[in-house]
Image: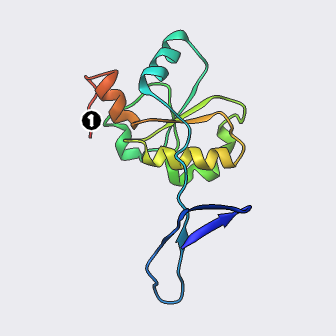
Amino acid sequence: MRYEVCGFRGPTAHREPRTAHRTRWYLPRMPAPAITVEDLKARRDRGDSITLVDVREPHEWAISDLPGSLKIPLGTLPQRLAELPQDAEIVVYCRTGGRSDNAVQFLRHKGYGKALNLAGGINMWAEVVDPSMPKY
C-alpha cells in the first residue's frame, strides 16, 4: 500500500501482521539529524557548550561513559524534559545510536531544535576516539 501526504505519494508503508482486532501501519521515517564522533570530539576539545545526554539504562553506565553527560534513560525522557534547556545544543547517545535516534526524534518534536544523535553511539566513540574504552 502506498501512502499520500499533501498530494505527494511516498514509498510503500509497512503493515504489521493483523493480530486480534487491530492492524498497525508504520510509515518509513528519516533518521534524526546526527553528529559524528570526530565532530563531537573536536567541538568538546574547542570547549563548545554542548549538553550530552546518555539515554542508556543504568546498568550500562558502568561499562562505558562520556564524562559530563546527563543520564536520562530513554523511558524516562518524557518526564525529565524540564532538565534540558530547550535552546541548548544537545547531543544524545546510547550504545550504537538506535535509542538515541528515537530520543532525538522525540526531542525535536517537543521543540528541541538543536538536538543531534551521536552517530554510532558510544561504541563508535570507543572505536574511533578512545580505543581504551570498553565496547559491548
The x and y percentages for residue 59 are 35, 46
Q: Residue furthest bottom?
A: 20
Tell me if mark 1 has few (under 14), some (14-19) or many (20+) residues whose alpha carbon lies within 10 angstroms of its own. some
- Of residues 107 and 28, the one drawn nearer to the viewer in this rendering: 28
The total number of labels drawn is 1
Disc 1 residue type (three-letter): Lys
Q: Residue 58 falls in which quadrant of the image? A: top left
Q: Is residue 25 above or below residue 20?
A: above
Residue drawn at x 53%, y 10% as measured from the top left: 46
Picture coordinates of residue 130, whole percent (x, y): 31, 21
Tell me the residue at 25%/22% (across/down).
Answer: 132
> Looking at this view, is 90 or 35 the one in front?
35
Image quadrant occupied by the C terminus:
top left
In the drawing, does residue 4 fall left or right of residue 134? Answer: right
- Image quadrant where one finds the N terminus: bottom right
* Depicted 16 relative to depicted 114: above or below: below
- The residue sitting at 55% across, 43% down in the picture is 32
Rendering quarter of residue 66: top left
> What residue did someone put label 1 on?
135
Task: Tell me if 84 is positioned left or right of 26 in this view.
Answer: right
Question: For the point 61% across and 68% down, which residue is it?
Answer: 3
User: At which x and y percent is residue 53?
Assistant: 53, 36
Image position, residue 96 (x, y; %): 37, 41
Coloring applied to the structure: rainbow
Q: Nearer the viewer, residue 57 or 111?
A: 111
The residue lying furthest to the top in this view is 46
Horizontally, is 93 left or right of 90 in the view?
Answer: left
Q: Is residue 15 above or below residue 50?
A: below
* Element under disc 1: loop
